[in-house]
Image (spheres, rainbow, N blue to C red):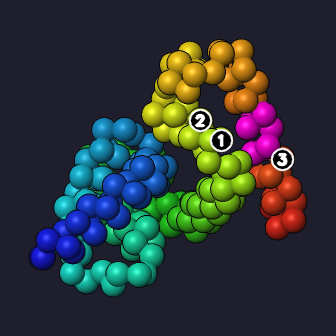
Amino acid sequence: MDSERHKLFLKLLMEHQAKIYSYILSLVSNYTDADDILQNTSEILWRRFDQFQPGTNFLSWSLKCAYLETLNFRKKQARARHLIFDNETLEQMVPVLNDGFKTIDHRHEILERCLGKVGESGQKIIKMRYNMDLRPKEIAKRLGYPVPRLYKVISKLHSTLLSCIERTLRVEGLE
């Protein structure tokens, strides 16, 4: 696999790994098993990445692979009698879980659109607080704000984002 394709795989896997893991965990309900299945799924995705068509839905492709790997894992576990759900119940759960991921993705898109409306300085504060996990005192220090002012700014940002998200959900009928 060439270097650019390798970079693309790593980028896509890192971008979606938490969702893949959550999906697997919802199917097996055991962190250790989910870790093992995720590792096996990642290896399979890597080996088969030449079959993936760039521009298509990597998450969907990955979840199908994760589902099949979970079934494979469950076959092994069935011999040991440790299953929580039978395969029929599991098959019934998959469409519901997939719909849930679509809803989460859509709400994430709405949040991204609303973040675009708070301006560059607001985005910087949100990024420092939630992406970099900085405490408000540290953010205030870095930006040269008095701490009480920063708390007011963060509160206003929360209110603005909440209003935007609620308004967008109402307009789209997803309340």
Q: Is residue 150 in the magenta section?
A: no
Q: Is residue 145 among the parts visible in the rendering? A: yes
Q: Amino acid at mark 3?
A: Ser
Side (left or right) of 145 relative to 54: right
Q: Is residue 49 above or below residue 89?
A: below
Q: Amino acid at mark 2?
A: Ile
Q: Which residue is mark 1?
A: 122
| Element type where label 3 sits in the image | helix
Residue depicted at x 40% and y 57%: 15
| Element type where label 2 sits in the image | helix
Side (left or right) of 50 relative to 67: left
Residue depicted at x 67% and y 23%: 150
- Mark toward the viewer: 3 or 2: 2
Q: Are marks 1 and 2 in contact (CB under 8 Å)?
A: yes
Residue depicted at x 19% and y 69%: 6
Q: Which residue is mark 3?
A: 163
Earlier-in-chain disc, 3 versus 2: 2
Residue 160: image x %, image y %?
A: 79, 43
Span highlighted in magenta in the image: 156-162
Label 1 to label 3, Cα distance in Å?
15 Å
Q: Is residue 161 in the magenta section?
A: yes
**Residue 146 lies in quadrant:** top right
Residue 157: image x %, image y %?
A: 73, 38
